Image (cartoon, rainbow, N blue to C red):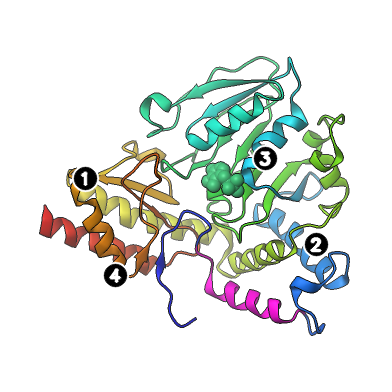
Amino acid sequence: MSHRILNFSAGPAILPEPVLAEAADGVREINGSGMSLLEVSHRGKDYEAIHADAESRLLKTLSLNPEEYATLFLQGGASQQFAMLAQNFLKPGVSADYIVSGDWGAKALSEAKFYGDAREAASSKGEKYSELPRSFTRTPGARYVHITTNNTIEGTEYFDLPETGETPLVADTSSDFLALRRDYSKFAFLYGGAQKNVGPAGVVLAVARKSFLAEANTDIPKIYSYKTFLDNRSLYNTPPTFAIYVVGLVLKWIESEGGLEAIEVRNKRKAAILYNALDELTPFYGPTVTNKSDRSLMNVTWRLADESLEPELLAEAKKAGMDGLKGHRSVGGFRASIYNAFPEKGVQALADLLRDFAGRKG
Ligand SMILES: *Cc1c(COP(=O)(O)O)cnc(C)c1O
């Protein structure tokens, strides 16, 4: 690629360059077949091999046992999962607990209320979601507890998962999918739009404990039933073949980089470069997440004490080849999304700019 800017976009977001190059080749021709990947049947052998590899590689990357867990490729974005999850597990009179740690979690809860007794078990809305809720109220017999592992808009992330006892833990992991090691076997179900950290828009990756899906509702249309996707290996209807292909390439890239262990080390180092600069330059800058143990590795958010300087900083960043730094419209300020593929030297360049700008204006 001739010219790459520093793309801090929250999503769709930066992908590894070797993945983009290989994906471009696959669009031209796949496996010497005389066809583009975009032209081959989802039931043909070329695509079948890609599909099977991505399915199993995802479980392997998360250290999950394929006897116990399955990969599902879904569509409609994480937003559709807010409704589909509840449609599969709730009914009037059946409850689920939602820990609301950000705007996306609040949306998940409000969609679930169409299907059953979805409750707000905790919320940090009073703190403008600048920290994670410390505890939650458990509803006896709740079908599941839902969390958002990384709050893309506000910049918080779970590192210790809440204890839910016997109640299955379900998570929206859209913006920290494959960003760090966790004990993923603690989740009964996790889902995320690929476009934040794992691939292009158009596919939702879900990982499900099979025994959890075995208890899902059956009185719903087939196309909305997780069991349909499980029983047909996400090939009941036409899956988003291109997006799954690119996800497969990203999974191979992660493996070649040393797996989640190496990715996590790098992500921690990258985030520390920015948080250290922001802490050092407080109060000129104010990191919006003050509780250090809640700070996201993926989305770093901050404000300027003097908000009138914000357009100037954005303009300087743009001139330095940086894009996507404007904070979400609901929060304001700045947000640097530094997903897996974001280069460490780009993070360093932003930290240098922040120091330089504060030196001149502070
Ligand atoms: C982006 C995002 C969503 C929404 O994803 P879509 O794929 O656009 O529906 C949901 N949850 C989180 C945590 C997100 O970051």
317 with respect to 93 (left or right): left
| Front of the two marks 1 and 4 | 1
> SS at mark 2?
helix
Residue at the disc numbered 3:
81
Identify the mark nearer the N-term, 1 or 4.
1
Identify the mark nearer the N-term, 2 or 4.
2
Q: Does the magenta stretch include residue 276?
A: no
The answer to whether the beta carbon of the residue marked 2 is less than 8 Å from any atom of ligand 1 is no
Label 3 vs label 4: CA separation? 38 Å
Magenta stretch bounds: 14-30
In the rendered structure, which amino acid carries the disc numbered 4? Ala
Residue at the disc numbered 2:
52
Identify the mark nearer the N-term, 3 or 4.
3
Identify the mark nearer the N-term, 2 or 1.
2
Residue at the disc numbered 1:
307
* Front position in the image: 182 or 136: 136
Label 1 vs label 4: CA separation? 21 Å
Q: Main secondary structure of the magenta part?
A: helix
The answer to whether the beta carbon of the residue marked 1 is less than 8 Å from any atom of ligand 1 is no
Label 3 vs label 1: CA separation? 36 Å
> SS at mark 1?
helix
Residue at the disc numbered 4:
320
Mark 2 residue crowding within 10 angstroms, few (<14) / some (14–19) / many (20+): few
